[in-house]
Image: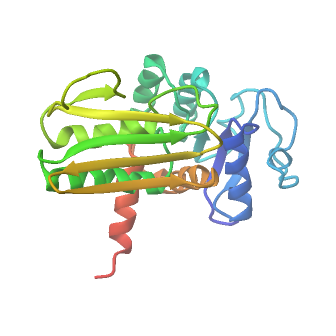
Amino acid sequence: MNGAVKLAVVGASGRMGRAVVRLASQEKLAQVVFAMAARQAGRDAGELAGEGALGVLAEGSLDGLARSGAQVVIDFSSADSCAEVARAAADAGVALVSGTTGIDAEARAALDLAATRVPVLWEANMSVGVQVLAALVKQAALALGPEFHAEIVEVHHAAKVDAPSGTALMLADALLPAGEPRELVHGRHGRPGPRGASELGMHAVRGGDVIGDHTVHFLGPGERLELTHRATNRDLFARGALRAAAAIVGRPPGRYRLSALVLESIAANAVT
């Protein structure tokens, strides 16, 4: 594990936190040196992840972060904790990668403030494939032009509480700068009349145990293009966070995007 990024995991007892610890250990992607799990304090982070003891006991607060030697924090805790984690990372001088969703204005402001002191990356979706999808969507919208109407369809499990998904909104952001201002239309019913030229349809489907499917439809005269990403295993989000953590360590303070880091990596590895 020599040379591996030294990692702190916040939310280590949650589904995503456990996945981060497990993959970091199994695939030697990082060395976990600190873990926080408010309701499982005192338990070994590796045991929480089903990996056996790592020698890192989960703590009930962030007080030990600064002395842990961590270079980067991965946070998959809760929206209520996001601002506290951002402040703690900044105070400790530790880079922050957060995949906590549903955050409010206070948390966003805390992330911005932390970014004046340490590198910060926050994403609603840590999937590398989704980041590539967003880049392709932007390129397709620019190339196809206003003759092609864009509609987004997202499918998630029955227990998901928000709609549209954060990823669908991210894809909408990728589309919006490509042309004239769009009007987000969340489904259609009754007699809404013909589709307006500025509409961007958002459609949420819920049921079963679907992790997350997202399709952007480009509907043009005589043809259509569909760009789709399907998540089949939640580990992909943990891998994306670990990839972001490795890429962000050592960078200057500021806000970073996973999409930029992915494209940077692709460019660096391109065969010329």
Above/below status of 28 relative to 76: below
Above/below status of 76 relative to 270: above
Q: Could you tell me residue 133's position as x and y percent?
A: 37, 54
Quarter of the image where one finds residue 202: top left
Q: Is residue 77 visible to us here? A: yes
Q: Could you tell me residue 8's position as x and y percent?
A: 66, 43
Q: How is the image coloured?
A: rainbow
Q: Residue furthest bottom?
A: 272
- Residue sitting at x 31%, y 38%: 172
Query: Total of numbered circles in the picture?
Result: 0
Q: Could you tell me residue 140's position as x and y percent?
A: 22, 55
Q: Residue furthest top?
A: 106
- Residue sitting at x 37%, y 67%: 266
**Front residue of this view, candidates 169 and 14:** 169
Q: Quadrant of the N terminus?
A: bottom right
Q: Is residue 98 visible to us here? A: no
**Front residue of this view, candidates 68 and 224:** 224
Q: Could you tell me residue 241's position as x and y percent?
A: 55, 49
Q: Quadrant of the C terminus?
A: bottom left
- Residue sitting at x 45%, y 57%: 129
Above/below status of 154 relative to 249: above
**In the displayed structure image, the side of residue 225 where residue 20 appears, left or right:** right
- Residue sitting at x 50%, y 51%: 127
**In the displayed structure image, the side of residue 66 where residue 182 appears, left or right:** left
**Front residue of this view, candidates 135 and 148:** 148
